[in-house]
Image (cartoon, helix red, strand yellow):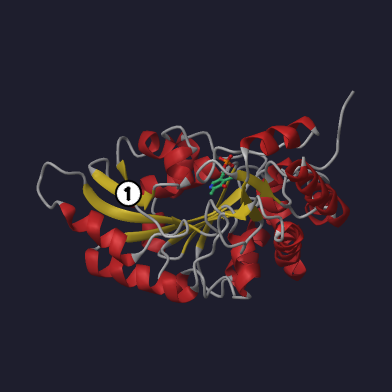
Amino acid sequence: MTDQSQQFASDNYSGICPEAWAAMAEANQGHERAYGDDQWTARAADHFRQLFETDCEVFFVFNGTAANSLALSALCQSYHSVICSETAHVETDECGAPEFFSNGSKLLTARTENGKLTPAAISEIALKRQDIHYPKPRVVTLTQATEIGTVYSPEELRAISDTCRELGLHLHMDGARFANACAFLGCSPAELTWKAGVDVLCFGGTKNGMAVGEAILFFNKKLAEDFDYRCKQSGQLASKMRFLAAPWVGLLQNEVWRKHANHANGCARLLSELVADIPQLSLMFPVQANGVFLQMPEPAIEALRARGWRFYTFIGDGGARFMCSWDTEVARVHELAADIRLVLQD
Ligand SMILES: *Cc1c(COP(=O)(O)O)cnc(C)c1O
């Protein structure tokens, strides 16, 4: 028996959105040049340059771990270090890939407030040691939206990039949920990236309706030197690149990416509102993007699992995480909220 009911374990439980699917089908006609020399790759890259209102360098890879690891390795030498939050995906969920692809650049974790780095936390780490025995800080990486569903405002980003500039650090953004952050703030992609001092963005497609694929955007084009070789060497140069690029065309046209992110964010907000009055439960973090983190008693968590719900409890201090996606059904959000209420009444 297969159960295809919608779950809230991750936004990557969802399928492919119709717009990405249609673009894939359109790209699936005839022959095209390989390895990114095709019209779809050129079109997708141009869409990004239009959307971000700047002439950035654009690369396409298969997943977020590769995007982050390769981008970070382009920004530092092996003796450098990368400052990230203690809850960063690069630190906790990439199996050491950033260190591996950079030949040993060390990740240094900084404390966070609501999942976000601060100028003070960055300075503290960067200035802690300046001797030859310590890996030299070279990059700051932050996640937008964060792993716990919060979002950096443009002002917060600018304060961080000012600090980076003072300290001689590059600024990288893990944007696995960048669309959700833009949707929450109602900001343009440019305002949340290069206009706020971000050098490189990994823009996630998978969690927002694509089958596979993340785009890496270098706003500081000098940093992209030889990046194509890095992609190839790490097995991330798709020979049939048109199928990584075409879904981006589907997503970037007509602001589809923003529509899907808005929907996911709205479902998360709805879930948090539907359970807000339950006394035995507390919201762990503000609900800004598409995730809801709930602190509840262990028996309730078990009872919820027994009722067939899947969700993670290892992210963000042991609470239960519920992620909404581009296709989350509002009725299913109500079902989940009703079951949460039920298991807390027992
Ligand atoms: C999902 C995710 C990624 C990408 O993960 P992959 O499984 O490698 O595609 C990167 N960063 C964050 C914050 C994520 O949530």
Where residue 148 appears, as percent x and y from the top left, is 54, 53
Where residue 20 appears, as percent x and y from the top left, is 78, 53
Q: Residue at x 76, y 41 (%)?
A: 343
Residue 15 image-quadrant placement? top right
Ligand 1 under 8 Å from disc 1 Cβ: no
Query: Identity of the amino acid at label 1?
Result: Val
Quadrant containing ligand 1 reads top right
Residue placed most toward the observer, 28 or 184: 184
Q: Residue at x 61, y 39 (%)?
A: 238
Where disc 1 sits, the SS reads strand
Residue placed most toward the observer, 104 or 53: 104
Please give left or right for residue 113 compared with residue 255 in the image.
Answer: left
Where residue 279 appears, as percent x and y from the top left, is 67, 55
Q: Can residue 38 be seen here?
A: no
Please give left or right for residue 200 compared with residue 287 in the image.
Answer: left
Quadrant containing the C terminus in the rendered view: top right
Residue placed most toward the observer, 98 or 145: 145
Where residue 336 appears, as percent x and y from the top left, is 80, 47
Q: Residue at x 43, y 49 (%)?
A: 71
Q: Residue at x 29, y 64 (%)?
A: 120
Quadrant containing the N terminus in the rendered view: top right
Q: Residue furthest left?
A: 131
Q: Can residue 95 be seen here?
A: yes
Rendered view: 131 above or below 52: above
Look at mark 1 in the image and give the residue it sits on: 82
Residue 163 image-quadrant placement? bottom left
